[in-house]
Amino acid sequence: MIVLAGGDIVLPDRILTSASLIIDSTRIGSIEPTTRVDATGATIVDATDCYVVPGFIDVHVHGIEGHDTLDGGSAIAEIASRLPRYGVTAFCPTTVACAPKELRAVLAQVKAARASRPEGSARVLPAHLESNFINPEYRGAQPIGCLRSPIADPKGPRRIEQGDPHDAARAFTAREGDFTANDILQVIRSSRSDVGIVTLAPELPGGIELVRSLVTAGHLVSIGHTGANFDETIAAIEAGASHATHLFNRMTPMTHREPGVVAALLSRQDVAAELICDGYHVHPAMCRLAITAKGVDGIMAITDGTGGSGLPVGSTARLGGRTIRVSEHGALLEDGTLAGSTLTMDRAFEAIVSRFEFSIVEAATLCSMTPARQLALAGFGFIAEGAVADLVVLDRGFRVVRTFIDGREVYRNGGVA
């Protein structure tokens, strides 16, 4: 038994100040409104001047501290071992578009990591595939040679021209390489339980049909890296898409006459949207607007973190095998293209409170409860009696002091517990 004594306990609807939380085995046993608890034989952890929040769940993270999900070997395990120091207790390993061989290898790692979690590591959830089925005009740092349309254009492959994203999407039916769209779909079919989220552009040929197929198979379909218009986005939602990848980034913007993807996502409460909460990928004012429009139950704070996260400015790492460099505001490809963030979840939490001006309770919902609900993780993402004891102790600057997973301390400021 462990007692977190004297801290401010962040509940789903309020903060219980100077209170104590009792961890009984893997669950939260009780929450007491006192600083002292009579618990004979219990380990007492002084949480005075700290917040106790539910463990962070990052549904979109490519890597951390020099490790990328597509590095091969034990990359997923390495990432899982490093995330608890940033308050992450569960995460969806996220991949950029890649060839079937690489996708098969990373999903094998995900399967192994889910089957047996090493002590001290974050929970590995089913993967998030920023898939091959995205619009090349909105690819960002995604490798263009790995992109495919779900079905071939009957007119045959054509050269991609700059301009109308729909023209690009229709033209993008085949690329260099030796694999097809069906090869990628076969990998997904063979690893159903280890693929949680699939990001795609619904305006691609066969896009809506792919949404329906993936949803029927049990995957969360996420709208992202897309040049869709408002109506096409609504059609994807009606087909079953219920997730949105990094709202505002790499999608058609919202204007008063062309509402685009963004307005469609903000207007529908049956879609939960990711938001990169570093204040750079999306301006703080726009973050406030989005969270206010959808409510904290409709937005998930994410990092979109890369192997550059946790490294100093000027460091290099990899993203899907390509070199990225850590800059002041994020990770960059060698040509200067923004290639994800260097954000960590503890800093996302801090930004939500200090820069976006939401409450600590709301920040906990955005970082923990909403992603848990979106992924149907029963008992996770909130603090209450009987809930899973995945917890983070934060100091007043929202720095991680301790992290608990399944009721066991896995990280203590200064090193692994």
Image: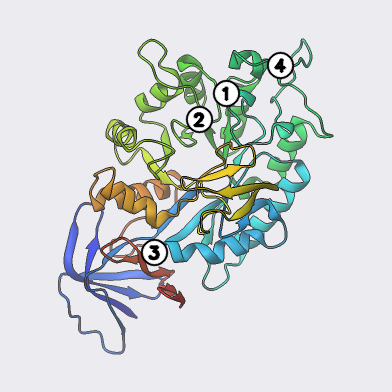
Q: Residues within 10 Å of mark 4 (few under 14, many from 20)?
A: many
Q: Earlier in the sequence, mark 3 or mark 4?
A: 4
Q: Which of marks 4 and 2 is nearer the N terminus?
A: 4
- Of helix, strand and loop, which one carries label 4? helix
Residue 283 point in image, percent of width and height: 36, 35
Which kind of residue does numbered mark 3 sit on?
Answer: Val
Marks 1 and 2, how far apart in space? 9 Å
- Of helix, strand and loop, which one carries label 2? loop
Q: Nearer the viewer, mark 1 or mark 4?
A: 4
Residue 204 point in image, percent of width and height: 63, 21
Label annotation for residue 202:
1
Q: Residue furthest right?
A: 178
Q: Which of marks 4 and 2 is in front?
A: 4
Camera-side residue of 274 and 192: 274
Mark 1 touches mark 2? (CB < 8 Å): yes
Q: Earlier in the sequence, mark 3 or mark 1?
A: 1
Label annotation for residue 241:
2
Q: Which of marks 1 and 4 is nearer the N terminus?
A: 4
Camera-side residue of 280 and 226: 280
Marks 3 and 2, how far apart in space? 29 Å
Q: Is residue 380 something one can see in this rendering? A: no
Residue labelled with disc 4: 171
Q: Which quarter of the figure has residue 190?
A: top right
